[in-house]
Image: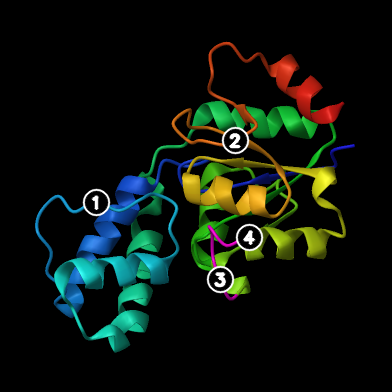
Amino acid sequence: MIKVVLWDLDGTLIDSESMHYQAILAANERIGLKLDDGFELAPGLEGVSVFSALCEQAGFTRTERYSEWYQYTIDYALQNLSDSPHLSLNIEWVEAFSKRGIRQCVVSNSDAQIVSQAIQELQIGAYIERFFSRDMVQHGKPNPAIYLHALDALGISPNQAVAIEDSCSGVTAAKAAGLFTLAYNNDVASADLYLNDVQVKRQQVFESILS
């Protein structure tokens, strides 16, 4: 029996990927990390993985500046998060799960400050029992540590929860933790079900995960 839905945040509940991209650009400029225009990063990566990939692309050797770079991305995000569009379809899902009496949490690769503010911006605090953020574990997604931590803290087994993700990184983490995983993005491979598939009806989802 499913007791808890574990929501990813960025790209799943709030369309913040563009804002995070701008935060990275601003942080790069601050520490003198210069990249060619149009560089690309896979969505859903944790901060240290992003920084490592950027340093490799740019040949930037001053890796000791990671903490400064990362804090600047957090500061930028906190200042600009309110401009990120809400993903209203998934907010409707949050409300629908709540009406079914299902507990809900957020499990995110973002820092706790960002997750907390996003929940306020989305006005879903009444539905979200608690959140789990990147700074609570040693390794972020795609490592399953954050999901395993959430399951342990909630006192439930993997078969009592489902995860909802939008990226390969997130789906990989959730599946490695043994969770039935729903994807908001049809381009993400290996998910068990896709929420934004026009053929999927809400009742079908409830039947799939609550049976």
Residue position marked by numbered label 1 in the rendering:
40
Circle 4 packing at 10 Å, graded few (<14), some (14-19), many (20+), is: many
202 or 78: nearer the viewer: 202
113 or 189: nearer the viewer: 189
8 or 118: nearer the viewer: 8
Q: Horizontally, is 58 left or right of 112 in the view? A: left
| First-in-chain label (1 vs 3) | 1
Q: Amino acid at mark 3?
A: His
* Residue 27 visible, this orientation: no
Residue position marked by numbered label 4 in the rendering:
144
CA gap between label 4 and label 1 equals: 24 Å
| First-in-chain label (4 vs 1) | 1
Q: What residue is rendered at 57% in x and 49% in y? A: 172
Residue position marked by numbered label 2 in the rendering:
191
SS for callout 1: loop
Q: Amino acid at mark 4?
A: Pro
Q: Amino acid at mark 1?
A: Glu
In this rendering, is residue 54 above or below 160? below
